[in-house]
Amino acid sequence: MGDLKVDSKDKDAKKYYKLSVQIKYLALTLFVFILIVLFSGGFGLFDLMEGGSFQKNVCGDGTLSDSCSSTKPYFCFEGKLVDSASVCGCSSGFFKKEDSCFSIYQTEPKKISLNYTLRGKNYSINFTVYRGLADYISNVPRSIRYTYGDDSSRADFKLKAINEEEQRKLLLPLVIGIQNITPDKEDQVRIAISIVQNIPFGASIKTTSFGDYKVNYSRYPYEVLYEMQGICGEKTDLLAFLLSKLGYGTSFFYYPLYNHEALGIKCPVKESIMGSGYCFVETTGPSIITDNKIYYTGLGKIYESPEVYPLSNGLSLGNNLYEYSDANRLIKIREAIKRDGQINIFREIIYENLKEKYGLVEYYYSG
């Protein structure tokens, strides 16, 4: 039998066929990659970072890369909000120095460390507070003047404390600090809540005057940070400020018989208190979102339905937060302890896991 010969035209055809298959394969691979990028929830524009991970070209407040934030003087650079007064300018009431903006109340700085727990890991944010602003805030009148026929509300005093203008200017850097940790909005909420919960509980020894009466002094949010302590209402004000500036709807819950306050954050109605659309957040110490069955030392469990006072409009928590189911687990464990005086080994494991996950100090507060 003679040698098998292949015509040169057949060789070229096979070569071009293989090349076309390779091109189609590469095109299909590129198409699948683009779909993955688009459906991963981004803008489709990513920077390749060290370690092979990708980061969206957007900062934690939603500002696009290489753009000025609506909060001056911050500029979005490589996923972080940085001072850039020379590009973005300063807000009213600040003066520019090099690339930063300063207030006349930024005197006698003091560094504080704000601790928080996120999914079982402990972290801290370093933040600078100023005696100049703390002294100014301490002299702001706590009273509100009403005209005849006006209806007064507890919410009026909360909003007065939360919205004080000079305070707002020097609290916003803390909001920016949280947004620089992660672009995930719900993780920003978790960090803010944990920060406030981990500030020690404590009442002020000062008093203030309402006409001829002396009453206990109520700290404003900035003073809670400066003094690193606060009671339920004061810490609730601070958390309401942080969450509202992170874009969420907030309220506060007031329990008249117990004189207790807690925060409400906008959430799905099925998870909320009394169908109010706001989920319960205890601020006096570490706890889980929606856990409103805590046993308080000296009080026991609060059975009273709260008064609900909306404070700000904004985003709602999603439907699938792991806190919802975790809070229910903890409530069942607490009820078992109350009923039986002990829990089985399986619940003990859950108990310890929840303690680590949320940085909880106590699960059960004997009344």
Image: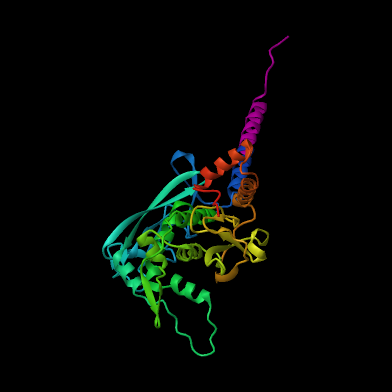
Q: Can residue 58 be seen at all in this image of the molecule?
A: no
Horizontal side of 227 relative to 34 (left or right) equals left
The single residue placed furthest to the right in the displayed view is: 1
The residue positioned 47% from the left and 44% from the top of the image is 121
Query: Farthest residue in the bottom direction?
Result: 148
**What colouring method underlies this structural image?**
rainbow
Instruction: Point out residue 93 in the picture as x, y percentages from the top left corner.
Output: 34, 73
> Going by the image, does 68 lie left or right of 15?
left
Quick one: quadrant of the N terminus? top right
Residue 98 picture quarter: bottom left
Image-based side of 308 in relation to 52, left or right:
right
Q: Main secondary structure of the magenta part?
A: helix
User: Observer-nearest residue: 94 or 52?
Assistant: 94
Q: Residue 181 colored magenta?
A: no
The correct choice, above or below, for 36 with respect to 5 in the image is below
Identify the magenta region: 1-23
- How many tags in the picture? 0
Q: Is residue 7 magenta?
A: yes
Position of residue 25 measured from the top left corner of the image (x, y, whole percent): 63, 37
Of the pair 105 and 358, the residue shown nearer to us: 358
Instruction: Answer whether residue 210 is visible to the viewer in this image.
Output: yes
Looking at the rendering, which quadrant does residue 32 occupy? top right
Q: Residue at x 38, y 68 (%)?
A: 169
- Depth order, front residue of 53/123: 123
Looking at the rendered image, the quarter that the C terminus falls into is: bottom right
Residue 19 vertical placement versus 87 (above, below): above
